[in-house]
C-alpha cells in the first residue's frame, strides 16, 4: 500500500506529467462552451426554454457525479462517502458550485456566443481570489493580484463592448455567464476549506449528484420535459458529463501532490481553448479573431497569469 501511494505521488509530480495533465484538463473545460451549444442545437432547445436548459444541466451532472465516484473507486481505496459531519458542507457546495453556477451558465450560454462565454467565464479566477481574501481570509490581496484582477475584468469589459454597441448585451446572456463565474469563484475557497477535512474528489462527486438532482427536478417543476435524444445528442451529453468527471478527478490529483499555485497557473489556458474551439465548432471566427476578441483574450490570460504568479511567489 505504501509503495502504491509513493509511486502515484512520484508520477503526478513529474514536470512533463503535470504540464500535459493540466493542459488536458483545461482543454476539456474549454471544450464545454461549444459542446453545450451543440447539444442545444441537436435537441432543438431554444434560447428562451430555460426549463429544458436546466434539465439538460441536471442530467449532465447526475451522470458526472456517478463517473467521479467511479474514478474515485479506481484511483483510491479509502471510504467512498463523506463523513457524517461533512454532509452540510457537501450540500452547501452543491448549491453554490452546481445549482447556482450551472443554472446561470446553461441559461447564459444559450443567450450569448461561445467566444464571449469562454472569456467571461475566465473571470472566475479573479472571483476566487477576492472571495478567498474577503470571506475566507485564505489569501492576501497584494498589488500584483489586484493588477491581475483589474486586467482580467478589463478583458471581460472589452469583449462585451461590441454587444453593448449592437444592443445585444443582456442579463440572461452575458450577465448570467458572469454570475456563473462568480459562483464558481466562490466555490473554489469553499472546496479548499472543506477539503481540509474530506477528500476533494468525494466532495465533488456527491455535490454533482445532489446538484444534478436539484437541477433536474427544478427543470421538471418549471415545465420542462425530457429531451428526445438521438445517438449524436446522447454522445454530446456523455462527453459533457465525462469531461467534468475526468477534469475534476485529474485536477484533484494534481493539486493533491503539487503546490496549488504551480497547478493554478495553467488555468489561463481555459479561455484560450474555449475561444479557439468555439471559433472552429460554432463558426464564430468573426468574434474570436477580431482585434477586440484577441485583445480581450490577451487581457484575461495576462490577468490570470499575474494572479497565479503572485500565488506561486507566496508559496516559495
Image (cartoon, rainbow, N blue to C red):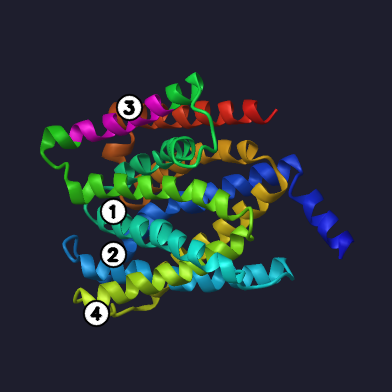
Mark 1 = which residue? 109
Residue at horizontal 28 percent and vertical 29 percent from the top: 158
Q: x%, y% of residue 60?
A: 41, 69
The residue lying toward the viewer, choosing from 193 and 205, is 193
Q: How many marks?
A: 4
For mark 3, give the secondary structure: helix
Residue at horizontal 28 percent and vertical 64 percent from the top: 40
Residue at horizontal 54 percent and vertical 34 percent from the top: 139
Label 1, residues with CA under 10 Å away: few <14, some 14-19, many ≥20? many
Instruction: Identify the residue at the far top of this view.
Output: 143
Q: Is residue 34 visible?
A: yes
Tell whether label 3 touches label 4 (CB within 8 Å).
no
Tell whether label 2 touches label 1 (CB within 8 Å).
yes
Mark 4 = which residue? 225
Q: CA distance from mark 1 to mark 3?
A: 21 Å
Which numbered disc, 1 or 3, marks the residue that appears first in the sequence? 1
Residue 154: assigned label: 3
Amino acid at each position: 500500500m505504501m509503495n502504491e501511494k509513493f509511486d502515484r505521488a512520484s508520477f503526478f509530480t513529474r514536470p512533463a506529467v503535470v504540464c500535459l495533465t493540466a493542459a488536458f484538463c483545461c482543454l476539456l473545460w474549454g471544450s464545454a462552451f461549444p459542446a453545450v451549444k451543440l447539444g442545444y442545437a441537436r435537441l432543438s432547445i431554444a434560447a428562451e426554454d430555460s426549463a429544458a436548459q436546466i434539465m439538460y444541466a441536471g442530467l449532465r451532472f447526475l451522470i458526472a457525479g456517478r463517473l467521479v465516484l467511479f474514478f474515485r473507486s479506481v484511483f483510491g481505496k479509502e471510504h467512498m462517502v463523506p463523513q457524517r459531519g461533512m454532509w452540510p458542507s457537501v450540500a452547501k457546495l452543491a448549491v453554490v458550485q452546481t445549482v447556482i453556477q450551472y443554472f446561470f451558465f446553461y441559461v447564459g450560454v444559450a443567450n450569448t456566443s461561445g467566444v464571449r462565454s469562454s472569456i467571461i467565464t475566465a473571470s472566475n479566477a479573479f472571483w476566487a481570489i477576492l472571495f478567498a481574501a474577503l470571506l475566507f481570509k485564505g489569501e492576501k490581496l497584494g498589488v500584483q493580484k489586484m493588477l491581475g484582477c483589474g486586467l482580467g475584468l478589463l478583458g471581460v469589459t472589452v469583449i462585451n463592448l461590441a454587444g453593448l454597441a449592437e444592443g445585444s448585451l443582456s442579463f440572461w446572456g452575458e450577465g448570467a455567464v458572469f454570475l456563473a463565474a462568480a459562483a464558481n469563484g466562490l466555490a473554489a475557497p469553499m472546496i479548499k476549506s472543506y477539503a481540509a477535512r474530506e477528500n476533494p474528489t468525494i466532495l465533488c462527486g456527491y455535490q454533482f449528484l445532489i446538484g444534478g438532482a436539484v437541477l433536474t427536478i427544478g427543470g421538471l417543476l418549471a415545465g420542462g420535459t425530457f429531451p428526445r435524444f438521438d445517438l449524436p445528442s446522447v454522445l454530446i451529453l456523455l462527453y459533457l458529463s465525462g469531461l467534468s468527471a475526468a477534469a475534476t478527478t485529474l485536477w484533484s490529483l494534481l493539486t493533491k501532490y503539487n503546490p496549488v499555485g504551480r497547478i493554478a497557473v495553467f488555468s489561463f489556458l481555459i479561455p484560450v481553448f474555449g475561444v479557439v474551439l468555439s471559433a472552429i465548432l460554432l463558426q464564430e471566427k468573426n468574434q474570436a479573431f477580431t482585434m477586440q476578441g484577441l485583445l480581450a483574450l490577451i487581457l484575461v490570460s495576462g490577468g490570470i497569469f499575474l494572479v497565479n504568479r503572485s500565488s506561486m511567489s507566496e508559496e516559495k
